[in-house]
Image (tube, grey):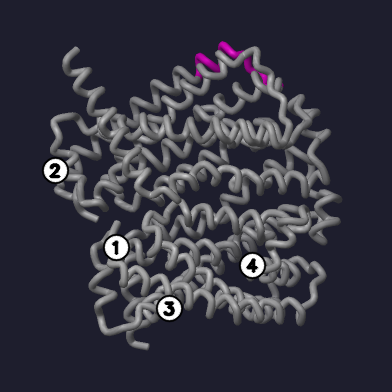
């Protein structure tokens, strides 16, 4: 029990440290609240250019939802948590390396994963705050009406998806130890996840081989489940299946992520390239 | 000239130390197009849209976004590589050494800019080859010359954007997020993914961004969409003549300011 409290304190210390660093760069801190809007608008405008308006008959025929803006918005809102995994967690070690504090952090009397868990905790809080802000503004501005009856299940689905994505974040952090150029790994995995996850389109439009890959991603079930509950999208799976698959994916992804991280950490220290650029 | 060549050599050496980055820049712009293709299929159920055609001059949205994706490589490398150029030197611990050498920082930045132009051209050439081999894009020799002409005009304009991005980094230090925002703004206000005529605001803002005119011209050449060659090249030239001196002036002013305040080496 003492050890758990010790680890939790370390995780919180990491979280607080990150808040302090981020608040030092105020323009960047506030930018993070507005960037998602600028990021989302091109997807809306692309849809409007294709449709000549906001509603799509074809989308309605395959998903039951005609509103392209609401459909696309939920997808990209949920995918915001991918940034937590790919950028915040993946970058955590490389950033310390650049600051010249990696060796000092690694000398602290806690396992390495505690440090990455601290980053995960911080970025979930930060990303969550951004997403709430984004959800309120976009919903009001575009007059999007959501069903609120299943909000509890939505939170469970998002929580399972986020923990599953932690596995990916830990994996990227581990790969960064060996491959150094972290942003390429993050960006490549981010791009692949964005392509394969049915963010602004249903599974039905994906080619069969991509559809099979998307079924092992937590984001697929996260996006589909939330859209089903909030917009009534027809998805071909019941909620129990979605929750069960998310739980299995969570266990597998976190296990693989931790395994790769520990392996790379051990390997890096043995070969002596942990501090190399 | 020697300084510029040495800077280019150094950048090449650093790039070759991270070969995975090369593969990333070649493949990513093509991959970024894929979600747009799926989104198009989900929204209209086909490969052509009359609403899109009325705005863009071509109803086939896939070649449209593909060309946007490929040529936006120039923009990304200008924003990211130039923007991060000095920040990376800061992280490497070499910024003060570089800036204390008897060379104007602008020349160093110019070396980085030229290197990025060459690099982007190589990436775009590979991407176009992929499109010719796998997606049936046709390129004739008569198309190459006007394309090169517009690409040169685009690159010159992007040097100005790159100088501004580098200056921003000197000023606010933690520029990663701001550069991302900068990139998103360019995505929003240029016809990379959709015709800017879709909204009056995007149409108005896009008028001052060089990438807008370059994309109009390049799509015109590659897809046979009608455009005014003389007018587009004159506007692009005019923007270049404004944006490059503006970029140089902003960079010089911010560099001077950071040196005076002693914040150059701060993180």
Residue B204 sits inside the magenta stretch: no
Callout 2: 10 Å neighbours few (<14), some, many (20+)? few
Q: Which residue is mark 4?
A: B209
Q: Which residue is mark 2?
A: A270
Q: Residue at image x 55%, y 44%?
A: A34
Q: Which residue is mark 3?
A: B110
Closest to the observer, A90 or A204? A90
Q: Residue at image x 56%, y 43%?
A: A36
Instruction: Evaluate whether residue A184 shows in this view.
Output: yes
Q: Tell whether label 3 touches label 2 (CB within 8 Å).
A: no
Q: Give the mark toward the camera: 2 or 1.
A: 1
Q: Is residue B181 above or below residue B226?
A: above
Do marks 1 and 4 share a subunit? yes
Q: Quadrant of the C terminus of chain B?
A: bottom left
Residue A119: image quadrant is top left
Q: Which residue is mark 1?
A: B90
The chain holding disc 4 is: B
Q: Residue furthest bottom?
A: B1
Closer to the N terminus: mark 1 or mark 4? 1
In terms of secondary structure, where does tag 4 sit? Answer: loop
Callout 3: 10 Å neighbours few (<14), some, many (20+)? many
Callout 4: 10 Å neighbours few (<14), some, many (20+)? many
Q: Tell whether label 4 touches label 1 (CB within 8 Å).
A: no
Numbered range of the magenta stretch: A234-245
Do marks 3 and 4 share a subunit? yes
């Amino acid at each position: 029990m003492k050890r758990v409290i010790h680890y939790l304190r370390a995780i919180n210390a990491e979280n607080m440290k990150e808040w302090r660093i981020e608040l030092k760069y105020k323009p960047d801190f506030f930018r993070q609240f507005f960037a998602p809007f600028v990021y989302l608008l091109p997807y809306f405008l692309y849809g409007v250019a294709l449709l000549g308006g906001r509603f799509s008959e074809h989308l309605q025929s395959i998903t039951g939802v005609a509103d392209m803006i609401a459909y696309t918005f939920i997808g990209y809102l949920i995918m915001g948590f991918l940034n937590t995994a790919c950028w915040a967690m993946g970058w955590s070690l490389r950033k310390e390396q650049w600051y010249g504090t990696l060796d000092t952090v690694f000398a602290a009397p806690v396992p390495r994963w505690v440090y990455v868990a601290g980053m995960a905790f911080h970025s979930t809080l930060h990303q969550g705050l951004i997403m709430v802000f984004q959800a309120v503004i976009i919903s009001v501005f575009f007059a999007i009406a959501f069903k609120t009856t299943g909000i509890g299940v939505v939170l469970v689905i998002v929580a399972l998806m986020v923990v599953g994505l932690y596995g990916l974040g830990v994996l990227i952090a581990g790969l960064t130890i060996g491959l150094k150029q972290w942003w390429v790994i993050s960006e490549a995995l981010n791009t692949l996840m964005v392509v394969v996850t049915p963010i602004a389109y249903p599974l039905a439009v994906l080619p069969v081989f991509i559809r099979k890959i998307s079924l092992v991603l937590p984001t697929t079930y996260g996006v589909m489940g939330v859209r089903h509950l909030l917009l009534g999208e027809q998805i071909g799976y019941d909620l129990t299946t979605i929750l069960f698959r998310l739980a299995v994916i969570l266990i597998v992804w976190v296990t693989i992520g931790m395994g790769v991280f520990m392996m790379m950490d051990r390997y890096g220290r043995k070969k002596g390239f942990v501090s190399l650029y | 000239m020697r300084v510029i060549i040495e800077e280019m050599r150094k950048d090449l050496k650093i790039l070759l130390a991270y070969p995975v980055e090369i593969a990333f820049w070649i493949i990513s712009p093509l991959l970024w197009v894929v979600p747009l293709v799926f989104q198009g299929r989900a929204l209209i159920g086909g490969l052509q849209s009359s609403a899109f055609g009325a705005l863009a001059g071509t109803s086939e949205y896939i070649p449209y976004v593909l060309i946007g994706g490929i040529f936006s490589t120039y923009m990304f490398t200008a924003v990211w590589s130039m923007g991060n150029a000095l920040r990376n030197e800061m992280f490497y611990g070499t910024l003060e050494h570089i800036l204390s050498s008897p060379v104007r920082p602008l020349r160093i930045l110019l070396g980085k800019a030229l290197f990025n132009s060459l690099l982007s051209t190589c990436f775009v050439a590979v991407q176009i080859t992929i499109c010719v081999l796998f997606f049936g894009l046709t390129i004739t020799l008569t198309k190459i010359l006007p394309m090169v002409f517009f690409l040169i005009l685009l690159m010159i304009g992007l040097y100005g954007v790159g100088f501004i991005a580098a200056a921003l980094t000197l000023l606010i230090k933690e520029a990663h997020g701001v550069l991302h925002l900068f990139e998103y703004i360019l995505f929003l206000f240029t016809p990379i993914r959709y015709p800017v005529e879709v909204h009056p605001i995007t149409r108005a803002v896009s008028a001052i961004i060089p990438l807008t005119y370059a994309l109009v011209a390049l799509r015109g050449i590659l897809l046979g969409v009608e455009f005014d060659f003389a007018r587009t090249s004159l506007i692009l030239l005019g923007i270049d003549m404004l944006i490059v001196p503006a970029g140089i002036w902003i960079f010089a002013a911010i560099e001077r300011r950071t040196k005076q305040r002693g914040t150059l080496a701060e993180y």
